[in-house]
Structures are given as structure tokens and as C-alpha cells.
Image (cartoon, rainbow, N blue to C red):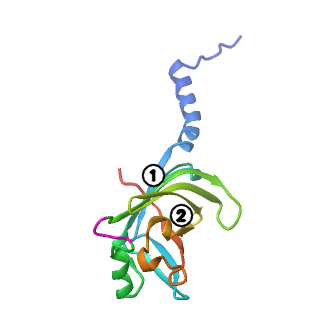
């Protein structure tokens, strides 16, 4: 009878680790970042019946997720509100003032996700989070999708914010016939692996 060769214990361990490696890597949390150099964070509104568009020139985004699964994502956004650019010098200066962003007192707005779930529509997921503007904290939903068919992953989405919930536009500017309460926000961000 031919002798059966025995696989050493070390060999069995190596085989087991090799087989398990793809699964472990698949669940590894990976973090990415984006900012004004790699994406666009834009907003739009209506004043005196006329629409206007703007964007923030200074912001940062950090997203961590497993296996490109947006439902596992944790997202942090910081925006320097004084960087708002609407292509109107007068309006941009007004936005910096106490009645609006009050940049000297509250230079930054933040949004942090609390959960992300699959949704229907143009965007595959909806994130529930907390938006902080002028030290006022409110629940804020954001619709988004992760696009992975290009050279780098992109996070795209939109949100609808009601400015008066954050005291943005006080005094005479609370008149919604003058400035609509709703502000639309859109973003398209190229994500880069976070530097270690």
C-alpha cells in the first residue's frame, strides 16, 4: 500500500489564511477624502423671484466604508462658510454678515452622517445626519450615490436645506417672498484614498 503524505501543520495554516484573505479584505474599512480641489459643492436659491447659483471654495469631506458599500459609510463634511462664491461681490459680502452665516462668529458649518440606507430614485442611497450652522443643530437628509466605473470613485448627491431653520437670513431677510426659504445643495466629489 502506498504511503499517504501528510501535510505539515504549517501548510494547513497557510492554506486557511490564504482562503480567508479575500473575505477579510472585502470587509476592510477604507477611508477617502475630497475637497474643493477634487470636487464641487454647489448651492442654489431664489431671491426676488430670480434664481442664483453659488459654490463653496473651501471644504473637506471624509468618507469611510466597507467594500464600496455606501450603506456602511460614515461621512464627515466641514465647510468654510466664508468661502461662498455666488459671482456677486455684494451678495457674497452679505452672506458673510451677521444676518446670514456670521462668519466672524461661526466660520464653519458641519454635517455628519448617522446612518445610510438604500433608497429609490435618481440616487441609490439616503443618508440621515446632523447639520450644524451657526451652532444650530438640525436633522438633515442627503441623497447620494457612489459612482465606481471611472478612474476614481465619485460621490454625487443633493440635499434640500431650509435656511430659516439655522437663522440664515434674519431680520428683513426672513421674508420668504424676498428670499425663498429653500436652498438646494448639490455635490460631485472625486474621492482619493486617505493618506496614512
Instruction: Name the one closer to the observer, 32 or 48.
Output: 48
Mark number for residue 155? 2
Q: Which numbered disc, 1 or 2, marks the residue that appears first in the sequence?
A: 1
Residue 161 colored in magenta in the image: no
Quarter of the image that includes the N terminus: top right
The outermost residue toward the left is 104
Query: In the displayed structure, would residue 191 be above or below residue 196?
Result: below
Instruction: Name the one closer to the observer, 184 or 60.
Output: 184
Q: Residue at x 50, y 22 (%)?
A: 10
Q: Please provide percent x and percent y for residue 145.
A: 60, 62
Mark number for residue 148? none
Query: In the displayed structure, would residue 29 be above or below residue 96?
Result: above
Q: Please provide percent x and percent y for residue 148.
A: 58, 62
Query: In the displayed structure, would residue 7 be above or below residue 1?
Result: below
Q: Residue at x 51, y 53 (%)?
A: 113
Instruction: Name the one closer to the observer, 73 or 185.
Output: 185
Q: Please provide percent x and percent y for residue 73.
A: 53, 51
> Is residue 120 in view?
yes
Which portion, as a residue range, is magenta? 101-105
* Disc 1/disc 2 C-alpha distance (Å): 13 Å
Q: Residue at x 42, y 69 (%)?
A: 38
| In this picture, residue 87 sits left or right of residue 7 | left
Q: Which residue is mark 1?
A: 31
> Is residue 148 in view?
no
Circle 1 Cα neighbour tier, 10 Å, few/some/many (<14 / 14–19 / ≥20): some
Q: Secondary structure at mark 2?
A: strand
Amino acid at each position: 500500500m502506498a504511503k499517504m503524505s501528510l501535510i505539515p501543520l504549517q501548510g494547513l495554516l497557510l492554506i486557511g489564511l490564504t482562503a480567508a484573505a479575500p473575505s477579510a479584505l472585502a470587509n476592510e474599512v477604507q477611508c477617502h477624502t475630497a475637497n474643493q480641489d477634487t470636487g464641487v459643492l454647489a448651492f442654489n436659491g431664489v431671491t426676488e423671484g430670480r434664481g442664483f447659483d453659488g459654490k463653496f471654495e473651501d471644504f473637506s469631506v471624509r468618507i469611510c466604508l466597507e467594500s464600496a458599500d455606501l450603506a456602511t459609510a460614515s461621512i464627515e463634511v466641514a465647510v468654510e462658510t466664508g468661502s461662498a462664491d455666488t459671482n456677486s461681490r455684494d451678495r457674497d459680502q452679505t452672506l458673510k454678515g451677521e444676518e446670514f452665516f456670521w462668519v466672524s462668529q461661526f466660520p464653519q458649518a458641519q454635517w455628519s452622517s448617522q446612518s445610510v440606507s438604500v433608497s429609490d430614485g435618481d440616487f441609490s442611497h439616503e443618508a440621515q445626519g446632523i447639520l450644524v450652522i451657526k451652532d444650530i443643530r438640525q436633522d438633515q437628509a442627503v441623497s447620494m450615490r457612489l459612482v465606481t466605473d471611472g478612474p476614481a470613485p465619485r460621490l454625487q448627491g443633493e440635499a434640500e436645506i431650509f435656511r430659516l431653520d439655522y437663522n440664515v437670513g434674519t431680520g428683513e431677510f426672513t421674508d420668504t417672498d424676498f428670499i425663498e426659504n429653500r436652498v438646494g445643495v448639490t455635490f460631485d466629489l472625486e474621492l482619493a484614498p486617505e493618506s496614512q
